[in-house]
């Protein structure tokens, strides 16, 4: 049953205060779970994925790669080699398009086969890869056969396939063709190199046999289950939030949400200050307090839907990597700082591995900033620096929290 909100904080059962919604959202994402007290193991990693359902992959490595940060934010310092062990040795995770490119539990693969079928029918995917298959299906088939015969292979090992074709058929089309085969489910990522290069192999050699043997669910049922998982990972969310989690189409997401409402899994609720209707997931935890300090990357599922971040915390959060330097407001790669239920600051971080420093290029306070934020952030930055094998934390004089943060670091070396 959906938890009754009556008596918990004194609000009617079909209404939630903003503070309530924040706690439900944080608990759904694992921030109410206890931090590990000993060595972080695969069990802890799976506990996080049981909350988030996936880890978005991104090549940005200014501080730490995007898929590593949500685990750090929820577990504290953890051995990053553990992810490759779980994903590529144990075969308990696989790479695919979940919310963008993602690591997902292998059990979710059958729920995404409809997306693979759409790619094969040229109904889903990005233009370049679809064009390659549409215009030169034989070329793509040759890529598949080479990987089947010789894989796992990096894209670079297939350059000669492009050279065998007409002069205009370039190296980029090898990558486009491989990504078509990946999106359509014919190839998967066997492993990644130390430089994070993807090695492709045919899917039947990558996924465990018990996953391959699962019957393919119908599209409507699979999408309904994906919305159910998204709802569990949100706790409380709008239809747009639920749709965005696994990047579903609007009409299909609406249909799935309505089916889950009729089933009783989702209950319509009003959230203080939200204009759009919201839905509370069955079994969503509603703790009285959530006490957690955490750095959140732009790709963390708690904050990647920017309009939801603004609705929950009144924080306008944008990634400025692609903004020209003179036009950046906060910095190149800002991480948000969660402190006791609120997003209280943001910091533009850079791991200076040459000098062994964690550089804070800018530090800014958010509307919910309060006394003690700088001290808590200083402690968290030291922990993050140690996790990345860095020493001193150096704060540059930019941002309205920079001076206070530098003083907090100096006061407790």
Image: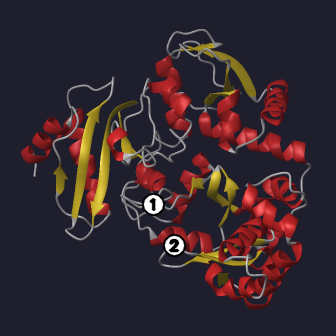
**Picture quarter containing residue 189?**
bottom right
Mark 1 lies on a secondary structure that is: loop
Q: Secondary structure at mark 2?
A: loop
Q: Looking at the image, can residue 327 be seen?
A: yes
Which residue is found at the position 66% from the left and 77% from the top? 171
- On the image, the x and y values in percent for residue 22 come to 49, 27
CB of mark 1 within 8 Å of CB of mark 2? Answer: yes
Q: Is 185 placed left or right of 362 in the picture?
A: right
User: Viewer-proximal residue, 29 or 318?
Assistant: 318
Label of residue 196 in the image: 2
Q: Residues within 10 Å of mark 2 (few under 14, many from 20)?
A: few
Residue 388 occupies quadrant? bottom left
Residue 393, how many percent across, how many down? 19, 54
Q: Position of residue 211 (x, y in %)?
A: 80, 66
Return the x and y of residue 179 as percentages of the image width and height.
72, 67
Q: Please, is residue 363 above or below residue 142 in the view? A: above
- Quadrant holding the N terminus: top right
Q: Is residue 184 visible?
A: no
Q: Is residue 142 left or right of residue 391?
A: right
Q: Earlier in the sequence, mark 1 or mark 2?
A: 1
Residue 384 horizontal side relative to residue 195, left or right: left
Is residue 411 shown left or right of residue 41?
Answer: left
On the image, numbered disc 1 is attached to which residue?
65
Q: Which mark identifies residue 154?
A: none
C-alpha separation, residue under disc 1 versus residue under disc 2: 10 Å
Question: What's the residue at 52%, 67% (across, down)?
Answer: 83
- Tell how many labels: 2
The quarter of the displayed image where residue 5 is located? top right
Identity of the residue drawn at 52% across and 36% down: 27
Q: Residue furthest left?
A: 411
């Amino acid at each position: 049953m959906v938890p009754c909100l009556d008596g918990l904080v004194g609000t009617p059962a079909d209404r939630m205060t903003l503070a309530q919604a924040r706690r439900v959202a944080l608990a759904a994402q694992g921030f109410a779970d206890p931090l590990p007290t000993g060595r972080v193991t695969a069990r802890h990693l799976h506990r996080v994925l049981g909350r988030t359902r996936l880890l978005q992959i991104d090549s940005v490595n200014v501080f730490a790669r995007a898929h590593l940060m949500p685990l750090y934010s929820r577990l504290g310092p953890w051995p990053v080699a553990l992810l490759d062990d779980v994903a590529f040795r144990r075969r308990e995770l696989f790479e695919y398009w979940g919310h963008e490119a993602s690591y997902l539990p292998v059990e979710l693969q059958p729920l995404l086969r409809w997306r693979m079928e759409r790619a094969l029918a040229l109904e889903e995917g990005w233009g370049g890869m679809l064009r390659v298959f549409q215009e030169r299906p034989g070329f793509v088939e040759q890529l598949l056969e080479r990987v089947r015969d010789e894989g796992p292979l990096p894209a670079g090992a297939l350059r000669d396939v492009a050279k065998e074709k007409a002069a205009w058929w370039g190296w980029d089309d090898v990558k486009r063709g491989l990504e078509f085969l990946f999106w359509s489910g014919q190839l998967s990522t066997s492993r990644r190199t130390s430089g994070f290069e993807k090695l492709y192999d045919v899917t039947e050699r990558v996924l465990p046999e018990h996953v391959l043997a699962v019957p393919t669910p119908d599209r409507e049922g699979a999408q309904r289950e994906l919305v159910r998982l998204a709802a569990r990972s949100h706790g409380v969310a709008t239809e747009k939030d639920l749709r965005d989690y696994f990047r579903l189409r609007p009409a299909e997401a609406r249909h799935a949400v309505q089916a889950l409402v009729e089933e009783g899994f989702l209950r319509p609720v009003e959230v203080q200050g939200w204009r759009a209707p919201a839905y509370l997931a069955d079994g969503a935890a509603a703790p009285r307090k959530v006490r957690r300090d955490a750095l959140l990357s732009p790709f963390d599922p708690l904050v990647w839907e920017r309009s939801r971040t603004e609705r929950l915390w009144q924080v306008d959060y944008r990634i400025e990597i692609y903004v020209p330097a003179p036009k950046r407001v906060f910095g190149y790669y800002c991480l948000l700082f969660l402190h006791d239920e609120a997003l209280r600051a943001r910091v533009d971080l850079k791991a200076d591995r040459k000098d062994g420093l964690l550089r804070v290029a800018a530090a800014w306070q958010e509307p919910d900033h309060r006394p003690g934020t700088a001290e808590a952030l200083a402690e968290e930055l030291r922990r993050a620096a140690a996790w990345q094998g860095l020493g001193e934390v150096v704060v540059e004089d930019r941002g309205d929290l920079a001076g206070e943060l530098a003083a907090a670091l100096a006061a407790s070396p």
